Image: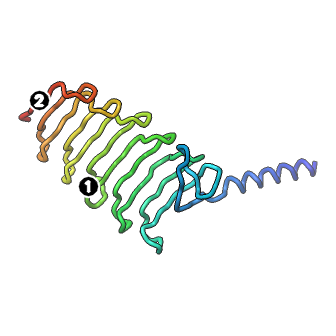
């Protein structure tokens, strides 16, 4: 009985220790054969990459997450002041699923471009004017414009609509909305 209690207690202690271990944070990764590794290590990296713009480690320049050498979650890049967000790339199973680039103060109203991906392939891009008004929206297939593409004036009025077929312009309409 005492042996069973000791084994269960030891097993629980090991699980508790492993479950509470801190996330590993490094500042450099190497890409080898499509996987990411900590420098001079043979096992694919799991943890967080944090790069600072200066030695004081006050201004974060980049943050990214990896699991078994594959990018996961959101990779964020900041300006050298560490305050203004420049871009975010969201990864699912190592493939891009969303890309956002900011203009100005790094807030949503300064958003400039956003792209959406399915299985790592570009499907849709949206662009904004600095005032937050939508500038363009376009559909893509195999990395080329395919389907409807729309552009707007800064005042919100539609400027054009265009239809593409595998990168070739099929029809462009000008609008007076």
In the rendered image of this protein, does residue 80 appear above or below residue 132?
A: below
Residue 7 image position (x, y, % from top left): 86, 50
Secondary structure of the residue carrying tag 1 is helix
Q: CA distance from mark 2 to mark 1?
A: 29 Å
Looking at the image, which residue is at 44% across and 34% down? 119
* Spot occupied by residue 65 in the image (x, y as percentages of width and height): 51, 52
Identify the residue position indicated by label 2 in the image: 173
Q: Nearer the viewer, mark 2 or mark 1?
A: 2
Residue drawn at point x = 25 percent, y = 35 percent: 138
Give the residue displayed 42% in from the left and 67% down from the top.
53
- Quick check: 3 above or below 81? above
Give the structural element (helix, strand or loop) at label 2: strand
Q: Residue furthest bottom?
A: 56
How is the structure coloured here? rainbow
Label total for image: 2
Q: Would you say 82 lies left or right of 40 here?
A: left
Q: Residues within 10 Å of mark 2 (few under 14, many from 20)?
A: few
The image quarter containing residue 165 is top left
Give the side of residue 130 with respect to residue 44, left or right.
left
Mark nearer the N terminus (2 vs 1): 1
Callout 1 crowding tier (Cα within 10 Å): few <14, some 14–19, many ≥20: some
Cβ atoms at labels 2 and 1 below 8 Å apart: no
Circle number at residue 110: 1
Task: Residue 139 in the image: state x and y as whole percent.
Answer: 28, 32
Place of residue 142 in the rendered image (x, y in percent of width and height, measured from the top left): 35, 30
In-front residue for pair 134/93: 93
Q: In the rendered image of this protein, does residue 91 appear above or below residue 121?
A: below
């Amino acid at each position: 009985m005492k042996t069973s209690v000791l084994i269960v207690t030891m097993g629980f202690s090991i699980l508790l220790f492993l479950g509470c271990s801190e996330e590993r944070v490094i500042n450099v990764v190497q890409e080898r054969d499509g996987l990411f590794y900590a420098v001079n290590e043979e096992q694919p990296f799991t943890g967080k990459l944090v790069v600072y713009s200066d030695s004081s480690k006050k201004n974060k320049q980049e943050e990214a997450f990896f699991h078994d050498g594959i990018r996961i979650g959101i990779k964020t890049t900041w300006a050298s002041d560490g305050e203004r967000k420049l871009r975010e790339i969201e990864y699912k199973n190592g493939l891009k699923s969303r890309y956002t680039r900011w203009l100005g103060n790094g807030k949503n109203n300064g958003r400039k471009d956003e792209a959406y991906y399915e299985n790592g392939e570009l499907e849709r891009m949206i662009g904004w004017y600095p005032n937050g008004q939508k500038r363009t929206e376009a559909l893509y297939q195999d990395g080329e414009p395919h389907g409807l593409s729309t552009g707007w004036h800064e005042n919100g009025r539609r400027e054009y609509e265009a239809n593409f077929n595998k990168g070739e312009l099929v029809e462009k309409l000008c609008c007076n909305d």
